[in-house]
Image (tube, rainbow, N blue to C red):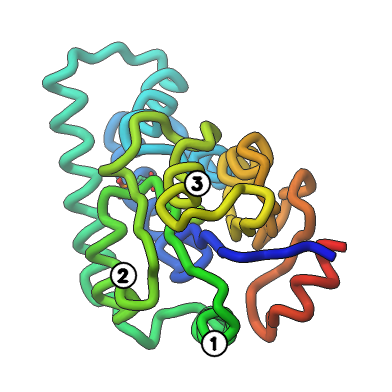
Amino acid sequence: MVAIKACIFDLDGVIVDTARHHFAAWKSLADELVISFTEEDNERLKGVSRVDSLDYILQKGNLVLDSAKKLQLMEKKNMLYLEMAASTAPTDVLPGVVSLMDEMTASGIKIGLGSSSKNAQSILDKLHLTSRFSTIVDGNNITLSKPDPEVFLKAAAAMDVAPENCLVIEDAQSGVEAAITGGFYAIGVGKGLESAHAQLENLEGLTIERISNLLQ
Ligand code: BG6
Ligand code: MG
């Protein structure tokens, strides 16, 4: 029997569909730089920090830029992203998230956030979810981006729960890899996440009992 004492949620693509805004903003920047940027590239960039994402795109286009220009491009991408995400509201929380959080809280399972995004706090505020988290670790608190497990290890330490008693819910390949490397249980949401302990299409109808069955 797996003893889950805490659950660390990724944000973009798990709690809310902001992953599409990250994609659209990077795509617009890549188009401007005349660098091809596909859905497949985007899959690889999910969970990856802003700077590492830009480096990936520039490398794809064989483009070498100085750090001032790179900073300017990252700011531009972020402005685009923030414009797209500006209207994010509580009704955008993905199906199943709130009821799962309610059940976890009622059962004494702590809830943490483990996101690479520096915008995580403002998105959680827009969703009216901030007060549900025991800890929030995001892109402002880490030095190493997923697939490094730092973000999840910090969240688990803040909740005083060992990784083997902690579930991570992730939509990104880099995030599932980070969770597995860190010794966590991982549920992947979406496709192509075979290295997770279990894969689901979405979180609709997910309960603690079903999680226990999936992790057996
Ligand atoms: C992750 C997203 O959550 O955050 C990535 O999956 C994004 O697509 C990364 O690049 C960093 O986000 P931000 O908001 O700090 O640019
Ligand atoms: Mg994600």
State which tag comes first along the sequence, 3 or 2: 2
* Residue with the mark numbered 1: 106
Residue 185 location (% of width, % of height): 70, 53
Q: Which residue type does callout 3 highlight?
A: Phe
Q: Which residue is drawn at 76% across and 60% down?
A: 199
Number of other residues with Cα within 10 Å of mark 3, as a class: few under 14, some 14 to 19, many 20 or more: many
Closer to us: mark 1 or mark 3?
1
Q: From mark 2 to mark 1, how far is it between C-alphas? A: 20 Å
Q: Which of 74 and 179 is in front in this view?
A: 179
Q: Quadrant of the C terminus?
A: bottom right
State which tag comes first along the sequence, 1 or 3: 1
Q: In which quarter of the image is residue 131?
A: bottom left
Tell me whether circle 3 and circle 2 mark residues in contact (CB < 8 Å).
no
Closer to us: mark 3 or mark 2?
3
* Residue with the mark numbered 2: 124
Q: Residue at x 72, y 49 (%)?
A: 193
Q: From mark 1 to mark 3, how far is it between C-alphas? A: 23 Å
Tell me whether circle 2 and circle 1 mark residues in contact (CB < 8 Å).
no
Relative to residue 146, is residue 126 drawn left or right?
Answer: left
* Residue with the mark numbered 3: 152
Element class at badge 2: helix
Q: Is residue 142 above or below residue 163?
A: above
Residue 161 location (% of width, % of height): 55, 54
Element class at badge 1: helix
Q: Quadrant of residue 168?
A: bottom right
Q: Which residue type does callout 1 highlight?
A: Ala
Q: Which residue is drawn at 12% across and 20% down?
A: 68
Q: From mark 3 to mark 2, how far is it between C-alphas? A: 18 Å
